[in-house]
Amino acid sequence: MFEINLDVIKKYDKPGPRYTSYPTAPQFNESFTSEKYLDEIIRTNNETAPPDLSLYFHLPFCDTLCYFCGCNMIITRNRGRVKEYVKHLKNEIDLLRTYLTTDRKAAQLHWGGGTPTHLDPDEITDLISYINQSFEFKAGAEEGCEIDPRGLTKEHLEALRNGGFNRISMGVQDFNDKVQKAVNRIQPEEMTRQVVNWVRELGFHSINLDLIYGLPFQSVETFTKTVDAIIDISPERIAVFNYAHVPWMKKHMALIKPEDLPVPEEKLQILKMTIEKLTGAGYVFIGMDHFAKPDDELAVALREKKLYRNFQGYSTHAGADLYGMGITSISQIGRCYSQNVKKENEYFTSLNNESFPVERGIYLTDDDVLRRHVITKIMCDFELDFETVEKKFSIEFEKYFSKGLEGMDDFLADGLVELKNRKLVVTQMGRLLIRNIAMNFDWYIEQKVDRAKYSRTV
């Protein structure tokens, strides 16, 4: 438990990146081509000790629209459309497999969406089998899948578990009936509890539940009941996301009336209550919006300074090359980021021509690599040793990051960071505003070349 100063939080509430990458996605450009992506695959293959593989598969389909959703998803009940997509997803696996050396093993697998369990159990089994035949997995690999309890059967979970999946992540958002109706996601508490019971009965190692604060009609009183219920369910991990109302980016969010959203003061009180309850119940505050039980791998990685961050959020697999497959998927390999095309027809055409379906990306400069390291350390270790950075990159830290350090004055005064023995240390309170702190080391923001519209940091 720690003290939360709402006046300080309000002071820093402004738009900013979530730093699941650096440079962030708005800096990706179309001059990065599939040929450049292939070059980087081959280069990493030839490293003395090629990194492990982290595999992400984007399954974008849902059968109903959640008005709050910020994901890249497709609403459809056309089973033929799903089958056609999966067929091309297998083609992308084949294409990647052509160029990866056979000795590279997968340490991590994740299915995201959309709703991966929009696939029926037989389709799940078939795709898992294809992946397992195509890649060799390390012993104890982390294999996680996002699920939606609405329309889910125990057979869906059995197919995932039998195929090797050992982690489940599920959206809850809020158990309040009025909130659920306002965002078009009817998911009774009893339904969620039933799925959690199935997950535990089938022997999955871990379950994560997602909550969202800032949704229509939420109040401290109503959300307290949801948080109490979540604590009683007792998942290994909990994510508490800030609803970002960005109808200029996601048009369907215009279906949510701004006047129904909680006012900023109420929203902050909801956040304060949630953090106090979860930490009071024994969950470790990982940072930003993540909580985990003390013996969970995320909490252990935080203590041992082995936490990592990528497009899947906080992770325990630092150093692995992330290969994203499916539309809109982002890969992070070596010194590049690469994002796939967004439209199905373009995805299909590219793969039919045996070409990686790359739409855009970026090759990192030496400065990008340095700043990525610094921002990752701040976001994951919540401290930064200047001397260690100097040895790794042959720079004079205070000189190189003079502007970033100048920007620390307010954070120091407000008790969000400490500077001692040439180390920047983020306090517990500072973890809530870690995005703001990291922004001081972002060259694109510093040079005002970043014009992206981001969600607010609180």
Image: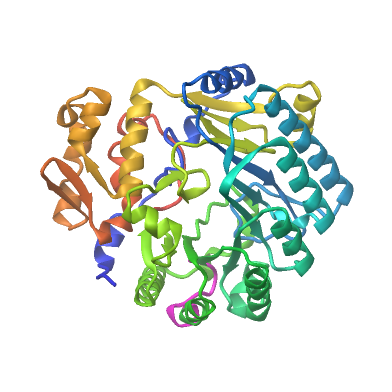
In the image, which residues are magenta? 213-223
Q: Is residue 153 visible?
A: no
**Image quadrant for the N terminus?**
bottom left
* Residue 250 percent location from the top left of the image: 61, 49
* Residue 327 percent location from the top left of the image: 69, 38
Query: Residue 81 occupies which quadrant of the picture?
Result: top right
* Residue 245 percent location from the top left of the image: 52, 56
Tell me what residue is drawn at x 67 percent, y 37 percent. Answer: 135
Q: Is residue 351 visible?
A: yes
Residue closest to the eye, 54 or 447: 54
Tell me what residue is drawn at x 32 percent, y 42 percent. Answer: 377
Query: Compared with residue 200, is residue 228 higher up or lower down, i.e. above or below?
Result: below
The residue furthest left is: 421
Tell me what residue is drawn at x 63 percent, y 79 percent. Answer: 189
Q: Is residue 44 left or right of residue 23?
A: right
Q: Is residue 217 left or right of residue 204?
A: left
**Residue 326 lies within the magenta run:** no
Residue closest to the eye, 317 or 325: 317
